[in-house]
Image: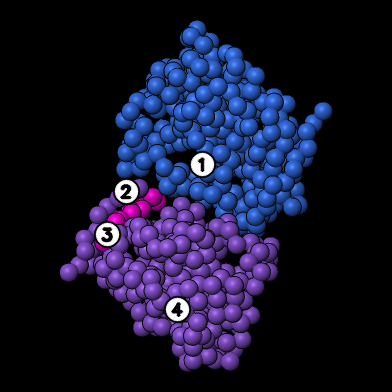
Chain colours: A blue, B purple
Amino acid sequence: MTSMLTEVSANRSFGGWHRRYRHYSSVLDCEMTFAVYLPPAAEVRLVPALWWLSGLTCTDENFMQKAGAHGVAAELGMAIVCPDTSPRGTELPGEHDSYDFGSGAGFYLNATREPWNAHYRMYDYVTRELPALVEEQLPLTDQKSISGHSMGGHGALVCALRNPELFSSVSAFAPVCNPSRCPWGVKAFSGYLGDDRESWKEWDACELIRGGARVKELLVDQGDADNFLADGQLQPEALRDACEQARLPLQLRTQPDYDHSYFFIASFIEDHLRHHAGVLNATR
Amino acid sequence: MTSMLTEVSANRSFGGWHRRYRHYSSVLDCEMTFAVYLPPAAEVRLVPALWWLSGLTCTDENFMQKAGAHGVAAELGMAIVCPDTSPRGTELPGEHDSYDFGSGAGFYLNATREPWNAHYRMYDYVTRELPALVEEQLPLTDQKSISGHSMGGHGALVCALRNPELFSSVSAFAPVCNPSRCPWGVKAFSGYLGDDRESWKEWDACELIRGGARVKELLVDQGDADNFLADGQLQPEALRDACEQARLPLQLRTQPDYDHSYFFIASFIEDHLRHHAGVLNATR
């Protein structure tokens, strides 16, 4: 049984619509909210979508309000879908105690440890349940690209590497490239997956590539003044090494003086949208 | 004695810099924070600035984060200056009790009633003290345009009408056009100025135009799905009537289905920036 979307709000934006919806997620077993930007073209035909996965502490709102992406999406005739970053409305022990675990920090994986495995299945949500729902009830084709920021950059890389047939292209801004080996990832994976590090490999972009997972190409932007780069949370060099060994074409762009903020994302989102639109148009 | 600017934060954005500063305002008698976007051109020459006045409840941050204006400002070689919307850090009786009076709601006027007149002098702050400060300490010419949203649209119109020599051009998004005759304005003017309605006229764009104040032209965007339009807070028809009687050229654009949000501002800010840049370039 497919759940129905309930519209929460609608804003005209660049000739299209920014709409937020609520629905019951059977995968996450809770009510969820997500946002979609529908370009003007969606009034006369089905359009492809960029799926955007946000970072720690975000909701569906951050990218829509701060990335300045609607204008280019309107021009390109692409929708943008922004899911939330974790299940909501559940009250698991300690769920809201830290910014980097639990609510706002779902890490786009399927948890296997109790009590998280009852709800924290964001991977199935963003790759299966929500695409089926929006492609049935909104004017979207099944053509998808995926991108994201930080924890959401990790999510975009992992979702694409595990589903190269589902996403036509993938890019990321300051992604957590090697979560098995950084403080954020070790905390999240220990909590959601347990201590068997073998089980972590299927949720780590570098490990997936080492294990044979492939996409056609990767586009990654990384600011060199990003404090989380200095803290060792992001590790683009690990992704570069994995891609080199696998001969996977990676365009890793170091952006001088840029930090981890949405000002960085806004500065380069047009490049990413045009990249994805080019691939989507070529494969249509 | 000029107060010094203390940098609070800096983010690279579209090849330029988004910087926030704190300083002591002698006009407001408190510490204030403001933001500036400096385009790449500001590294090699002085640049003109668009002054942006935000609406109720905002700070210096809303426009910078949500309007998507940096890219066009970078291209045009224009700075953007975003002051805060009221004095801060003062603790006047009832100052923080409502969203439309006191903190976050300075209405860009000089209060005459106690206790507000000790601090609430945002008009002098945004037209005199802050321009002098930033034009001395940042790479800005003294060429200025001004725009704003809602309460800040009112502020932009009033500041320009009272200082046509100071601002080369003026525009507004969903401005409070006739504050003497709308609930927000009556509450603010009664509180800040007292009950003598004659004294309100110098802070009301429509009354200023009826009294002979002039600018060369006005550009105003108004969404027709704006709930505050329906509530009678904005009254663009009063501005239209005043401009018609005064033969003041007004380009009043009704934008179908747009609301009062930053999605509306983002959709049309490029038009406004190009309009202001055209005037600034012509007068340079």
Q: Which residues, given as a range, are shown in magenta? A: B12-24
Q: Assess whether mark 1 and mark 3 are in contact (beta carbons under 8 angstroms).
A: no
Report the magenta stretch's main SS: strand
Label 1 belongs to which residue? A272
- Secondary structure category for the residue under label 3: strand
In the picture, which quadrant includes the C terminus of chain B? bottom left
- Seen as rendered, the residue at the extreme right is A1
Toward which corner of the image does residue B179 lie, by quadrant? bottom right
Q: Chain of mark 3?
A: B
Q: Residues within 10 Å of mark 1 (few under 14, many from 20)?
A: many
Q: Residues within 10 Å of mark 3 (few under 14, many from 20)?
A: some
Label 4 belongs to which residue? B193
Label 2 belongs to which residue? B9
Label 3 belongs to which residue? B23
In the picture, which quadrant includes the N terminus of chain B? bottom left
Spatial separation of the CA atoms under disc 2 and disc 1? 27 Å
